[in-house]
Image (tube, grey):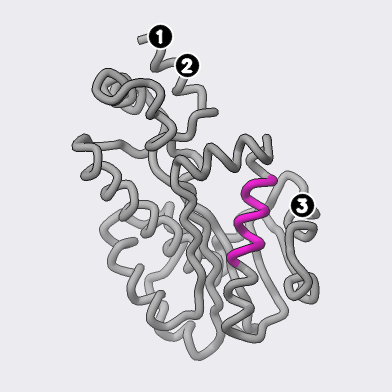
Amino acid sequence: MSISRIGVDESGKGDYFGPLVIAACHVDLSSAEFLSGVKDCKKLSDKKVLHLLPIIKSVCKHSIIVIGPSKYNELYEKFKNLNKLLAWGHARSIENVLEQVDCNYVISDQFADPSVLNKALFEKGKKIKVESRTKAEEDLSVAAASVLARGEFLLKLEALSKQFGMTFPKGAGITVDQIGKGYIEKYGFEKIDQVAKKHFKNTQKILLI
């Protein structure tokens, strides 16, 4: 790896329960040598992700932004668009890393409109080159960011499960609907925003079960 860069990625955007987590991670020659085994989190087991999480944290300058369900629902109401919400979170995480290290190159996953991310960056961020591309996770910096985001998502989902005394599954499938129904029966529909992303279709499915 010849170029110092910041990779950025997110986890939880396809999961009904739990937070949206966005991570930015700086990787250069000195840190890259410690990142053996790091690849796109979708190609790693949860156990491996959680094993790599503290390693990446210890060797890379990084920022992890956790948007819990309640805050997520509040922000979604504000932005009315997931790409705009993601761009806001990506921009904030990038800027947090720029406070820790000098870097002028950022790689992110492909947004529907990459210019949305550029517009969301503040003054310091506007001085860097942002490359949005498909399969960005093939780059080590983005892969490391994906592991940071997924690892933190898994930890927060587990904490949420313990808080409410029920196991919240990942994803947005039938099992999610069944658990959602049980949650509403126990805590009431008015509290669904404390654990879930309300705009998902699962919310309406749960009400019909």
In this view, which residue lies farthest toward the bottom? 30
Side (left or right) of 35 relative to 161: right
- Name the residue located 73 percent from the left edge and 56 percent from the top edge: 117
Quadrant of the rendering where the N terminus is positioned: bottom right
Q: Are the residues flagged by discs 3 and 2 in contact, CB closer than 8 Å?
A: no
Specify the principal SS of the magenta part: helix
Q: CA distance from mark 3 to mark 1?
A: 36 Å
Determine the image quadrant of residue 55. Answer: bottom left
Relative side of 111 to 182, left or right: right
Confirm or deny contact between disc 1 and disc 2 (CB under 8 A): yes
> Is residue 183 positioned above or below 87 on the image?
above
In the rendered structure, which disc, 3 or 1, sits on the residue that comes first in sequence?
3
Q: Position of residue 150 (x, y in %)?
A: 41, 55
Q: Which residues are magenta?
A: 84-93
Q: Residue at x 66, y 39 (%)?
A: 78
Residue at left offset 79%, top offset 76%:
127
At label 1, which amino acid type do we have?
Answer: Leu
Q: Which residue is mark 3?
A: 116
First in sequence: mark 3 or mark 2? Answer: 3
From the viewer's side, name the closer residue of 32 and 60. Answer: 60
Residue at the spot of label 1 = 208
Residue 91 part of the magenta segment: yes
* Residue linked to disc 2: 204
Of all residues, the one furthest to the top in this rendering is 208
Q: Amino acid at mark 3?
A: Val
- Name the spot of residue 102 as percent of width and height, x first: 65, 86
Q: What is the x, y in percent for residue 18?
A: 39, 42
Residue 30 lies, with reference to residue 178, above or below; the image says below
